[in-house]
Image (cartoon, rainbow, N blue to C red):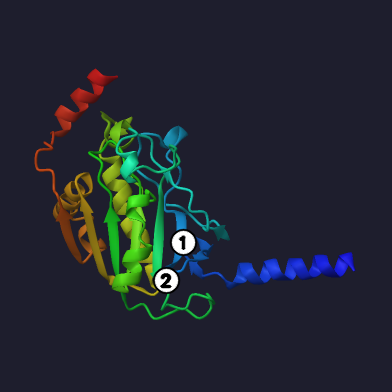
Amino acid sequence: METKLFLLFTLCLFGAAVAGPTVKTNNGHLFGVSEAEASVFYSIPYAKPPVGNLRFQNPVPIGYLGDIDVTNNTGVGCIGMRLMCSIGQCAEFESEDCLYLNVYVPTSVDLSDPANQPKATLPVLVWFHGGAFWFGAGLAPLYDGRFLAEKTGAIVVTLNYRYMPFGFLAMGSSAPGNMGFRDQQVALQWVQDNIGVFGGSNSQVTIYGESAGAQTIGLHLLSSVSKPLFTNAFMQSNPVSFTFKTSAEAVDLGTRLS
């Protein structure tokens, strides 16, 4: 009797696991979670962890990982200041290993069988969080993309990018500068390469963000590398008071900081 109950319990668990949304990306199978508002894939790695020899370096796109459980909504953000947490702009935890993105898919899209890929027709909204290049995270509670996906019928992507010295220190080859901006470019390339399996159209990608996120969007609009990675853009509360530095000025500042 105990053996039968154990087998029944195991089958129930297996049935619950396979019932969740599943997609096959270039990096492997992603196993997400069905929420009331959307099918969600939390903390998908889009670049190798920027630690060790990769600290202060440009991001390296993630390779093939096999089966990936992306059902945990425990927020991990990049290391920075713990500011404005009371209004939901902080992740629960911080780590140097932080280059992850989250995908929120309307429940109208059937993702129950990765062998039966949905038509790639939905528009895609990619959110760049603000935070003065000091703080913020894609999985901060304020940026929960479930409700926007539900209301608009679009696929919503939120992401982490490095900031403070980890993202923008410039010291020549040891720290080329603008690493956080390049994190965003690698994330956008991931969207181009993989969003189709979620039902999203990579020719209908809109990037949007506020504060520091808005300022990076202004730079994407100027970048020839970024140009093929999105279709539309809009900036919210663009902080024009943030001044830019030449490469020489940035290296001088980084040298003095060290």
Residue 198, disc:
2
In the image, residue 241 sits, relative to residue 119, either above or below, namely above
Badges 2 and 1: C-beta atoms under 8 Å apart?
yes
Q: Residue 173 appears in which quarter of the rendering? A: top left
> Would you place residue 153 above or below residue 2 in this image?
below
Residue located 38% across and 40% down the image: 78
Q: Position of residue 168 (x, y in %)?
A: 27, 35
Residue 194 shows in this picture: no
Q: Residue at x 16, y 55 (%)?
A: 235
Q: Secondary structure at mark 1?
A: strand
Mark 2, secondary structure of its residue: helix
CA gap, disc 2 and disc 1: 10 Å
The C terminus lies in quadrant: top left
* Residue 127 left/right relative to 194: left
| Front-lying residue, 75 or 176 | 75
Q: Label 1, on which residue? A: 41
Place of residue 24 in the rendered image (x, y in percent of width and height, measured from the top left): 50, 69
Is 150 placed left or right of 224 in the picture?
Answer: right
Residue at x 46%, y 33% (from the top left corner): 52
In front: 142, or 153?
142
